[in-house]
Image: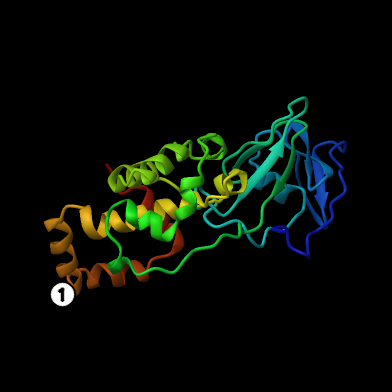
Amino acid sequence: MLMGANSVKVMDKSKEKGKKKIGDTARNVPEEMVTVYIMGKGYRVPAEATIMGAIEYAGYQIKRGAGCREGFCGACGTVYKLPGDYKIHTGLACTTLVQDGMLLAQLPFIPNEKPAYDIDSLLPDVTAFQKVYPEIFRCVACNTCTKACPQDLQVMDYIQTAMRGDIEKTMDLSFDCVSCGLCAIRCPAEIVQFNVGILAKRLYGKYLAPESPELGQRLKEMKDKKYNTEYMEMKGMSYEDLKTLYYDRDSE
């Protein structure tokens, strides 16, 4: 379970005017609150909180399943249901906002078999998938994997392209996958879709991707220590200076 064993049990004091106490600490309570059920227990949390923020507001200490906290590392897979809705919904706790009456639970690491293979022994065609992930040919095209994807990827489509041996298309359709595992836990054919995408990307990078002269030049510059002075300057910066440098950088 992602919530640590040393989680803090918090009593709901949202009825107190202006404050909610957690231990010896007092803080302002937002005007708009909603009720969510975390692992079966109800808590009052801010209406604008993410699921991850709500879990911590309720007093739990998240020790696992929280990598980046600013979006899409794939570690915080969550399932939840809403009042009056029979469907099981999926999402990432760092980006999914709470809703009143939401019943939720974070997921542990999604166990999956990841075969060992030698990329040099594989060809960039359908035989690679036949050898490493033959279970993809059990796909029944139900599209459940696509519906579960928090990245809105066309997961079923890239499994179908893998079945046809189209490495480039499989790589392209699965490129933004964060390996959260939500597709795999919903798949009736027990396919581990995100591992299939990883294999496609590796095959594309080794055999099909066009060479980049700019990349070769940059690697040579790094080997020649061209950026060492700048690197050492950054190592000496404070956290706030690094943060400013990062967010003020020019980006496409």
Q: Is residue 135 left or right of residue 175?
A: right
State the quadrant of the C terminus: top left
Q: Secondary structure at mark 1?
A: loop
The one of 143 and 57 positioned closer to us in this rendering? 143
The one of 116 and 247 positioned closer to us in this rendering? 116
Can you tell which quarter of the image residue 229 is in?
bottom left
The one of 178 and 122 positioned closer to us in this rendering? 122
Q: Residues within 10 Å of mark 1 (few under 14, many from 20)?
A: few
In this view, 227 is above or below 110: below
Can residue 42 be seen in the rendering of this structure?
Answer: yes
Residue drawn at point x = 83 percent, y = 45 percent: 40
Query: Hey, which residue is sitting farthest top in the picture?
Result: 84
Can you tell which quarter of the image residue 238 is in?
bottom left
- The residue labelled by disc 1 is 224
State the quadrant of the N terminus: bottom right
Disc tally is 1
In this view, 184 is above or below 222: above
The location of residue 137, given as percent across then percent down, is 46, 47
Residue drawn at point x = 71 percent, y = 51 percent: 56
Query: Hey, which residue is sitting farthest bottom in the picture?
Result: 224
Can residue 245 be seen in the rendering of this structure?
Answer: no
The location of residue 184, given as percent across then percent down, is 56, 49
The location of residue 158, given as percent across then percent down, is 40, 41
The one of 48 and 193 positioned closer to us in this rendering? 193
Amino acid type indicated by mark 1: Asp
The location of residue 233, given as percent across then percent down, is 30, 69
Residue drawn at point x = 19 percent, y = 74 percent: 223
The figure's colour scheme reads: rainbow
